[in-house]
Image (spheres, grey):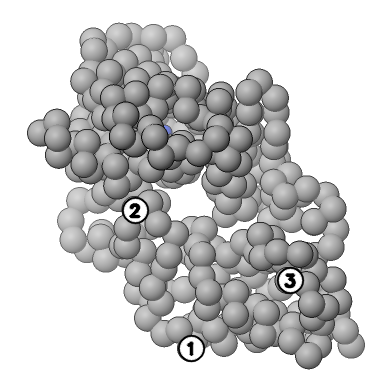
Amino acid sequence: SHVADLIAAGEVVERPGSVVKELLDNAIDAGASAVTVEIRSGGMSYIRVSDNGCGIPSEDVETAFLRHATSKIRDESDLAAIGTLGFRGEALAAVAAVSRVELLTCSSEEEMGTALSLEAGVPGEREPAGCPRGTTLVVRNLFYNTPARLKFMKKDSAEAANVAAVVQNAALSHPEVSFKFIRDGKEEMLTPGDGKLLSAIYGALGREFALGLMEVSSSGADARVWGYVTKPLSGHGTRGYQHFFVNGRYVKSRLMTAALEEAYKNRAMTGKFPGCVLHLRLHPGAVDVNVHPAKTEVKFLSERRVFDAVYYAVLSALEGELS
Ligand code: ADP
Ligand code: MG
């Protein structure tokens, strides 16, 4: 029902950044190697996400916007070991329910692309359209039909900063994909998509941050940890430079922060906070990603193992640097 759609939408789509996150997940799931995100007025008036992924076949474009329509899960065993980022089939329905959407897509098997517009989730006529392989979604006037939600939005600059962080995190979790971010007509970020994490860090977080880093790499039976951390005896005024990823997803984790900072203690701390871009790879069963779609928390089966994996990985990198 319409009301059920709006309630569900509120859970997935909290702000422009959550729209961008969902659309980026879809682009990555579609196998894109290049993705462009453009926003105007913090994403409230305009969001565009274009990818060169597999596209959506013409006959499926309306279905993609139905709630619980997903092409990614067929049975419960798929759910147990989620390999793709999206899996609930909720995102497009939720975004479309609270905005005006234009879809332009062309799948690999088709010569002609398809255009579809939706108003508050109601699709218009599907039309053939010329376009390159891939998908473009334009989202206008977010929350125009849910004034109560509109009131909770922060200033455009704060929403834009949140969108930028979402794009950064996508770039840092997918160095093999080139990400471009355009804000109010100005290109603010570009990563090369050459597969190297350090290149993605340069592009997403800047040269100065990248130059202050050293490499971390370790693998054990339970976990693999890799990425970059602040060199010893340097650091940042806030924890805002700590970026953690678990199985390719950006997460906020007090546990991982604690493990990182513990490794610096007594050796390399300066009263500042270490920064990092750290990836952790765990067996899919060792981490619960089936939590709330819009949240970035994770649940680990064994916190001890995760702490140790991060702590010892960072420690051995620091000791290598200090010796
Ligand atoms: P989910 O990602 O959970 O499957 P979504 O609502 O995000 O659900 O997307 C619905 C479906 O639309 C996806 O399963 C996929 O088939 C299709 N789709 C969405 N975005 C893209 C895209 N950028 N490229 C190709 N297919 C897409
Ligand atoms: Mg999705």
Q: Is mark 3 within 8 Å of ligand 2?
A: no
From the viewer's side, name the closer residue of 177 and 275. Answer: 275
Rounded to the nearest angstrom, the CA distance separating label 2 from label 1 is: 25 Å
Local crowd at mark 2 within 10 Å, few (<14), some, or many (≥20)? some
Relative side of 273 to 8, left or right: right
Name the residue type under label 3: Pro
Residue at the (70%, 85%) spot, across then down: 263
Please name the residue that numbered disc 3 is placed on.
Answer: 274
Please name the residue that numbered disc 2 is placed on.
Answer: 293
Position in image of residue 196 (x %, y %)? 70, 53
Residue at the (56%, 75%) spot, across then down: 256
Name the residue type under label 2: Pro
Q: Which quarter of the image is occupied by the N terminus?
A: top left
Position in image of residue 192 (x %, y %)? 70, 40
The numbered disc on residue 12 is none
Q: Nearer the viewer, mark 3 or mark 1?
A: 3
Q: Confirm or deny contact between disc 3 and disc 2 (CB under 8 A).
A: no
- Picture quarter containing residue 82? bottom left
Please name the residue that numbered disc 1 is placed on.
Answer: 304
Q: Which quarter of the image is occupied by the C terminus?
A: bottom right
- Picture quarter containing residue 316? bottom right
What secondary structure is marked by label 3?
Answer: loop
What secondary structure is marked by label 2?
Answer: loop
Residue at the (66%, 65%) spot, across then down: 239
